[in-house]
Amino acid sequence: MLNGAVANRYARALISYAQEHGVVEDIGAQLSKIRAFLGASKELSQFLASPVVTPDEKMKALEGVLGEPLRPDLARFLAVLLERGRGSYLALVSDRYQDLADALNGRVRVEIETAQPLTEADLGELVRQLTEACGKTVVPKVIENPALIAGVRIHVGHRVLDATTANALRQFRDRLLARAVRKEGIR
């Protein structure tokens, strides 16, 4: 819980600065790239969290991985984060920043799990319906999961809409078991 509070404080400070200077999307783009590298490389995350590695070495590693120079304002922010020994919070800060930026811009990120690939038309229709239901611009992330058998599972924040065959079968099994237990008189 403390990690979340610390990450939230840093993210709020960064989004406040970005909003004040009109660079919310620019900072968000570079932060998203860094976040993607952190998600793909456990070694990078451990490197940034290491108390043995100097903040300068960590900054050089981030710029090297990014493949482009960091924005000066983001570089200053990351330097403060790293100098205070908060390198392990970078992924959380990035995620929280993205949430705050989305809220500012009326967006919501939605994860859509499907058993088979969606056609462009199906995805477009699904996004349209979700946008209408949420009242915000939907940014979809589609994940194929053959274990679902058929249908779709949609994650919107902490809500899950599950219209999959696997879920229907699970509910059917639970009803059968509940009926069998009642019939046997076991409660």
Image: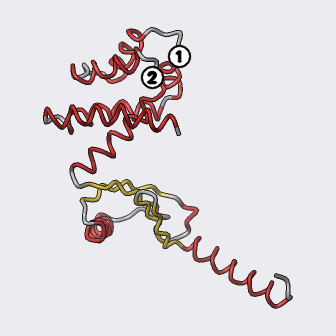
- First-in-chain label (2 vs 1): 1
Locate residue 23: give its quadrant: top left
Q: Position of residue 52 (x, y in %)?
A: 53, 9
- Residue at 50% across, 18% down: 47
Question: Along the horizontal axis of the image, is 76 left or right of 158?
Answer: left
Locate residue 146: give its quadrant: bottom right
Disc number for residue 87: 2
Q: Which residue is mark 1?
A: 50
Q: Position of residue 136 (x, y in %)?
A: 25, 61
Locate residue 29: give its quadrant: top left
Q: How many marks?
A: 2
- Residue at 32% across, 18% down: 63
Q: Is residue 154 above or below residue 99?
A: below
Q: Position of residue 168 (x, y in %)?
A: 58, 77
Look at label 2 and name its amino acid. Gly
- For the C terminus, the image quarter is bottom right
Question: Along the horizontal axis of the image, is 7 left or right of 103?
Answer: right
Of the pair 145 and 60, the residue shown nearer to us: 60
> Given contact means CB atoms under 8 Å apart, are the residues at marks 2 and 1 in contact?
yes
The alpha-carbon separation of the residues under discs 2 and 1 comes to: 8 Å
- Label 2 crowding class (10 Å Cα cut-off): few <14, some 14-19, many 20+? many
Of the pair 42 and 84, the residue shown nearer to us: 84
Q: Is residue 29 above or below residue 103?
A: above
- Residue at 25% across, 66% down: 135
Q: Is residue 4 above or below residue 116?
A: above
Query: Which type of secondary structure does the marked residue at label 1 adopt?
Result: loop
